[in-house]
């Protein structure tokens, strides 16, 4: 039987993970197997750069944290070695980065996740990973707003240029006479 100190550490780990999952914008559960140290180092660096917390934990701790955070549906995916990636700001970042490595490494796979309190299966996480980032979406929206304005400005400028040429042609014969 584990001693009281070990049980307290595990309880704290569950509470900490459940609290993070509860306030996170999104999270992804991955099967953490078959990744090389080099790829793991690159992946963790990319996740840190995107503001994503990535942790390899025992399935029992992840499972209890899922229960506490309201994501009990994720518990069915807890077999083998697993890791959790949590983002507090960007809903898409964990899925995008981890999908990149899941596509390269056959045994490293996306298991499930959550976004804004909703549980996703592996297909849902893959779909989430295909969404452009927030910056790209904002750029597209701004581009679609600016497009018609630029078209209007060019059309008005063409009218002004055309009228300016006609006025110049009318002024030239008048000056000769």
Image (spheres, helix red, strand yellow):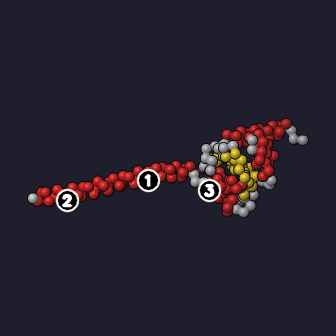
Disc 2 versus disc 1: distance between alpha carbons? 33 Å
Label 2, residues with CA under 10 Å away: few <14, some 14-19, many ≥20: few
Q: Quadrant of the N terminus?
A: top right
Q: Nearer the viewer, mark 2 or mark 1?
A: 2
Q: Nearer the viewer, mark 1 or mark 3?
A: 1
Query: Does any portion of residue 97 appear in the rendered image?
Result: no
Tag 3's secondary structure?
Answer: loop
Disc 3 versus disc 2: distance between alpha carbons? 57 Å
Question: Residue 17: percent from the left, percent from the top?
Answer: 73, 42
Counting residues from the N terminus, which is met first, the one under dot 1 or under dot 3? 3
Q: Quadrant of residue 163?
A: bottom left
Tag 2's secondary structure?
Answer: helix
Label 1, residues with CA under 10 Å away: few <14, some 14-19, many ≥20: few
Residue drawn at x 70%, y 62% is: 105
Front residue (pair 37, 16): 16
Q: Which disc, if any, is residue 169? A: 2
Residue drawn at x 75%, y 44% is: 71
The reply to whether discs 1 and 3 touch (Cβ–Cβ < 8 Å) is no
Front residue (pair 106, 128): 128
Query: Does any portion of residue 156 appear in the rendered image?
Result: yes
Label 3, residues with CA under 10 Å away: few <14, some 14-19, many ≥20: few
Residue drawn at x 46%, y 50% is: 145
Counting residues from the N terminus, which is met first, the one under dot 3 or under dot 2? 3
Relative placement, left or right, of 10 versus 1 is: left
Relative placement, left or right, of 73 versus 3 is: left
Counting residues from the N terminus, which is met first, the one under dot 2 or under dot 1? 1
Disc 1 versus disc 3: distance between alpha carbons? 25 Å
Q: Which disc, if any, is residue 147? A: 1
Q: Which residue is mark 3?
A: 130
Question: Residue 117: percent from the left, percent from the top?
Answer: 69, 43
Q: Quadrant of the C terminus?
A: bottom left
């Amino acid at each position: 039987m584990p001693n009281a100190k070990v049980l307290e550490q595990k309880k704290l780990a569950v509470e900490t993970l459940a609290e993070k999952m509860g306030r996170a914008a999104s999270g992804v559960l991955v099967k953490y197997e078959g990744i090389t140290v080099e790829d793991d180092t690159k992946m963790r660096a990319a996740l840190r750069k995107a503001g994503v917390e990535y942790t390899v934990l025992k399935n029992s701790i992840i499972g209890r944290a899922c229960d506490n955070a309201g994501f009990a549906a994720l518990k069915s995916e807890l077999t083998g070695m697993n890791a959790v990636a949590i983002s507090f700001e960007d809903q898409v970042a964990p899925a995008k980065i981890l999908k990149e490595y899941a596509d390269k490494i056959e045994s490293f796979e996306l298991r499930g996740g959550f976004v804004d309190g909703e549980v996703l299966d592996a297909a849902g996480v893959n779909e989430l990973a295909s969404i452009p980032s927030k910056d790209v979406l904002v750029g597209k929206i701004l581009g679609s707003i600016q497009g018609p304005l630029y078209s209007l400005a060019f059309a008005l400028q063409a009218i002004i240029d055309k009228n300016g040429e006609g006025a110049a042609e009318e002024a030239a014969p008048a000056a000769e006479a």
